[in-house]
Image (tube, grey):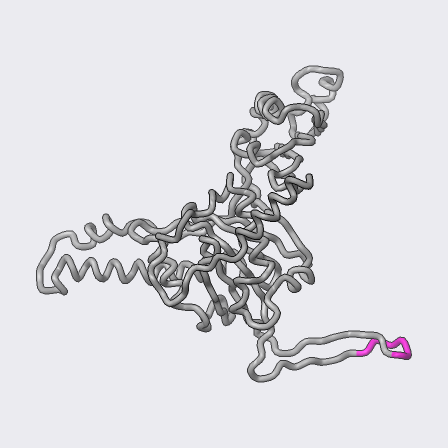
Amino acid sequence: MRVSILGFEIKLAKGVTVGDFYQQIEAIEDKEIDLKSRKTVLYTDVVDGLLCGIVLSYKSSRKSLITARDKDGDLKVTKNTLKKNEHGTEVSIFSINPITLKGLFYSYSGSVSPTGFAELLKKCHDKDLKYKKSSYKDELTEFGTKPVKNVSKKISARYSGSFSLSLLATPADLSKLLPRYSAIKSVILRASNALSDGGRYTPLEDISKKSSVIVDIDQNSMIGDVTDKIKKVFGVYAKQKEETVLRVIGLAHSGEELSLIVGENNDNFGRIHYDEYVDLLPLVKWKEYNKCEALERLIEKIMETDVVFGKLPPNVDWKHRSTKQPLRIFTAKITERSQTDAISG
C-alpha cells in the first residue's frame, strides 16, 4: 500500500483569525471525537512556525487474521484480538503554513480521508464562528434588553463566509506551473489536434482520434529560454481542458523528479510505502509525533516548495497564548543539510 502526500488549502470565514481557529484545535486535543462512524483523536503543536498535528483514526474491528506456512508447508491461520483498551489505528500527520493556509498531509486507504480531515477542522472553525456571532448579537442587543433592527444582517456583515478545504491542483495556467521546475526534461502533449500545425503527419489528422507529441529538451538549454518557448508553443493547448493532456517532466527545486499535468488534477507531493511510513512515526507515544521523521519530511517539503506554500513565517504572533509553547525542531537541521548537499553537489 502507498501513502500519498497531498497538498491542500483552507479558507476561514470573515472574522475568524488563524489564532482563533488554532485555539479551537488545541481545545479538542487528546479527546475522542466522533467522525464518520469512527473515533478520532488529535494532537497539535506549532513546530518551526507551522501549524502541525496528527490525527489518529480508530478502527471499528477488534480482530485480525495472520497467515503463515507451518513446518509441513500448510497455510496456518492466527486470529488476533485486541485487548479492551487497545485500538487498531490509522494515522495522518499534517502541517499548515498559517500565513498562506496551505499545507500537506499524509493520506492512504484507511486513514482519515480529505473529507474527514476537512470535517474535523470545520468543527473547530464553526465552534469559534458560532461563539463570535452569539457574542456580537449580545453586544448589539445588550443581552436581549435593547431592540435592534436588522440584527442578523449586521452579524452577517461582520462574520460572513464559511470554512472550506480544497486539495491543491496543478495550475491550469502554464505560466504558474513552470516556476515549480528547476530543470525541464520533456513535454508530452496528447490531444485531438496535436498534428494540426503542418508537417508530414498532417494527412493523418482526419483519421486520428487523438495523437501524442513528445519533445525531449536539450539539458544544456537555459531554463528561462526553455520555459519561454514552452509557453509560446504549448500555451494554447494548456487552455483546452477537454480531450487534452499536457504533461511537463523535469526536476523540482529540491532535486526530486517532478511530473505534473496542467489542469485540474490533484497535486501529489510524493508517495512512500506504508511500511516505510510506519517506521517514520513515533516509537512510543503519539504526542511525540512532533519530533518524528514523518513530520520532518512534511516541513522539509513545505520549505522546498515555498513557491506553492509560501515561506515559513518569521514569528508566531498569530498564535494566542496557551500552555503549549511553539517548538523549534527541524528547520535548523534541514537548512544545514541542504547547505551541506549544495556544497557536496
Image quarter (top left, top right, bottom left or bottom right) of the C terminus: top right
Task: Name which residue lies at 37% across and 63% down.
Answer: 24
Residue 174 found in image quarter? top right
Which residue lies most toward the bottom here?
Answer: 84
Residue 326 found in image quarter? bottom left
x and y percent of residue 177 in the render? 55, 34
Q: Which residues are magenta?
A: 71-76
Is 300 drawn above or below residue 247 in the view shown? below
Task: Name which residue lies at 58% across and 76% down.
Answer: 87
| Tally of numbered discs | 0
Image quarter (top left, top right, bottom left or bottom right) of the N terminus: bottom right
Task: Name which residue lies at 58% across and 21% down.
Answer: 232
Using the image as rendered, state which of residue 27 and residue 316 is in the foreground: 316
Report whether 21 appears left or right of 69. left
Which residue lies most toward the left here?
Answer: 146
Which residue lies most toward the right here?
Answer: 72
Using the image as rendered, state which of residue 200 and residue 316 is in the foreground: 316
x and y percent of residue 321 in the render? 33, 62
Is 200 drawn above or below residue 295 in the view shown? above
Report whether 4 appears left or right of 158. right
Is 200 colored magenta in this rendering? no
x and y percent of residue 58 in the render? 55, 71
Is 277 drawn above or below residue 256 in the view shown? below
The overriding secondary structure of the stretch rendered in magenta is: loop
Residue 220 seen in the figure: yes
Report whether 4 appears left or right of 165. right
Task: Name which residue lies at 64% across and 45% down.
Answer: 340
x and y percent of residue 116 in the render? 49, 60
Residue 215 seen in the figure: no
